[in-house]
Amino acid sequence: MTEITGNGTTGKLLGPLRTRPWAERWLTRALGAAVAAASYVVCVPWDLRNRAESAGATRETAPVTGVGVAALGVLLLLLAAYFGHRDSRGWPLLLIAAPPAALMYVSLRTHPGQPDGFASAWPLTWAFFTLVIAAGVLVAAGVGRAFRVEEESTEGLVSAGQR
């Protein structure tokens, strides 16, 4: 049987990051942030040639699909649950929610607004979807943390016996 914590393969992949060496901890965190950013780029493509569907049309073509957004949501929730299980409480928010939010900010900031009067509404769009992503990441990290196996501490029992 494989061990849950320790030096086994499962221990390295599912054990708490605080017990791992410093370099492995930060490499795992950097890899998680890179996977979150890459999943945003793959699932929500950014077409630099964003253009009108036909001459004179105000609606632009967009490569974003509902399936891509759903796939991004699933990937981010799985990553958040994984890092919630392995790391401290705040790390999933920084590692999983921040890269897509930053990429979305750059994407919305660089695309010109539509001429329908909502050109300046992109900050509200960005803020809303950033809050949705952050809330989802926090919930998934909490669920992942609930499945964490904590080692029982005997510190209180030892100090009580010395009195």
Image (cartoon, rainbow, N blue to C red):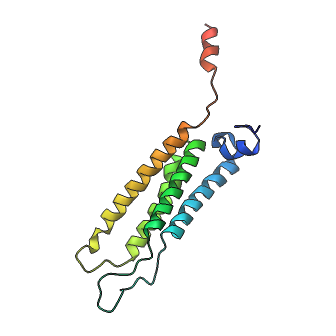
Q: Residue drawn at (54%, 42%), measured in percent from left and top?
A: 144
- In which quadrant of the rendered image does the C terminus lie? top right
Residue 158 image point, x, y percent? 64, 15
**Residue reaching furthest bottom?**
55
Q: Residue 141 in the image: x percent, y percent? A: 51, 45
Residue plotted at (47% across, 58% down): 73
Q: Quadrant of residue 128?
A: bottom left
Residues 129 and 143: in front is: 143
Q: Is residue 89 visible?
A: no
Task: Please tell me whether residue 9 is drawn above or below residue 68 in the rendered image.
Answer: above
Residue depicted at 53% across the width and 37% down the height? 146
Residue most extreme to the top: 163
Above or below, 65 against 163 in this view is below
Residue lying at the far front in this picture: please name it: 67
Q: Is residue 104 visible?
A: yes
Q: In this view, which residue lies farthest toward the left?
A: 117
**Residue 35 versus residue 140: which sits nearer the camera?**
140
Measured as percent of width and height from the top left, residue 45 is found at 49, 73
Quadrant (top left, top right, bottom left, bottom right) of the N terminus: top right
- Location of residue 88 in the rendering, given as x and y in whole percent from the top left corner: 55, 42
Occupied quadrant, residue 152: top right
